[in-house]
Image: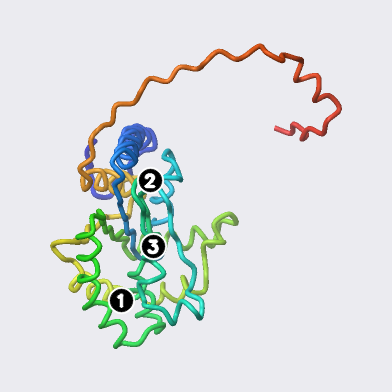
Amino acid sequence: MSKKDGNEKLGRKAYEKELRKLQEELCSLQAWVKEHKQRVVIVLEGRDAAGKGGTIKTIVDRVSPRVFRVVALPAPSDREQSQLYLQRYIEHFPAGGEVVIFDRSWYNRAGVEYVMGFCTPEQHQRFLLLCPIVEKFIIDNGINLIKIWLEVGQEEQERRFHARIDDPIRQWKLSPMDLESFKRWYDFSKARDLMLEYTDSEHAPWYLVDSNDKKRARLNCISHILSRIPYKRVEQKKVELPNRSEKRKYDDMASLKGRRFVDQRY
């Protein structure tokens, strides 16, 4: 698969073919993570409408929710606001045999909290200085930390916002915060630049993904995640269905007659 033109969108047929291969590899990764009790944290960040939700949904679509957990925390409670900043995130970190994907993470402080004034400039600066130290501690404790930034352009972001406005089944994705962030494009750009300057470290680097084409972005994200984890295929025992026991056999469909079935409208 190659990209012939920077403006050419990836077709659905080609996308689904490549996605199937990558999802099979994710299942291999899953088996390896379970077998070897590995711990993986994936941080997905980006502007509003950059495609985080769709990318995460694609990653976890064919794997077990017992292994791949998605964490999308709401706004902090009064109690959580009084805690150590990273405390509420760390409590969701993986145990052995788990992959945790943060849909918005501790990097909220470097982005929306900073731009929208939900933290002080001093808190923002302290976060930027301490974050690489904390991430070094996380990695030194055996957790594989992968940080991905989805980068969408102004025109594409605006197109996606209009699509949400015009589509009744997407309107729930719009919030007053989204509209406010749309106005503050360059404030968020500056916040992104500061975040990368301070936290793009050797031990926990940021990797940027062009997300103007959602399909390509999803494939590239999954491919990158697979490349960052040194997994190997785990031999799986061939499964064979056992014979059904005929013991206590009876007409178990006849016993359902007269029960309330949903109307078959489709």
| Spatial CA span between label 3 and label 2 | 22 Å
Task: Kindly indicate the quadrant of the structure image that contains residue 117.
Answer: bottom left
Please name the residue that numbered disc 1 is placed on: 186
Image coordinates for residue 120, horizontal then vertical, percent: 35, 87
For the point 52% across and 65% down, the residue is 174
Of 233 and 146, nearer the camera is: 233
Upstream in sequence: badge 1 or badge 2: 2
Query: Circle 2 sits in a helix, a strand or a loop, which is it?
Result: helix
Identify the amino acid type marked 3: Gln
Upstream in sequence: badge 3 or badge 2: 2
Colouring used for the render: rainbow
Image quarter hosting the C terminus: top right
Count residues near mark 3 (Cα–Cα under 10 Å), then give few for <14, some for 14-19, many for 20+.
many
Q: Is residue 223 left or right of residue 59?
A: left
For the point 81% across and 22% down, the residue is 255
Please name the residue that numbered disc 3 is placed on: 157
Residue at the outermost right position: 258
| Spatial CA span between label 1 and label 2 | 30 Å
Query: Circle 1 sits in a helix, a strand or a loop, which is it?
Result: helix
Task: Kindly indicate the quadrant of the structure image that contains residue 45.
Answer: bottom left
Of 117 and 249, nearer the camera is: 249
| Spatial CA span between label 1 and label 3 | 13 Å
Query: Circle 3 sits in a helix, a strand or a loop, which is it?
Result: helix
Count residues near mark 2 (Cα–Cα under 10 Å), then give few for <14, some for 14-19, many for 20+.
many
Mark 3 vs mark 2: in front: 2
Report the disc number at residue 59.
2
Residue at the outermost front position: 247
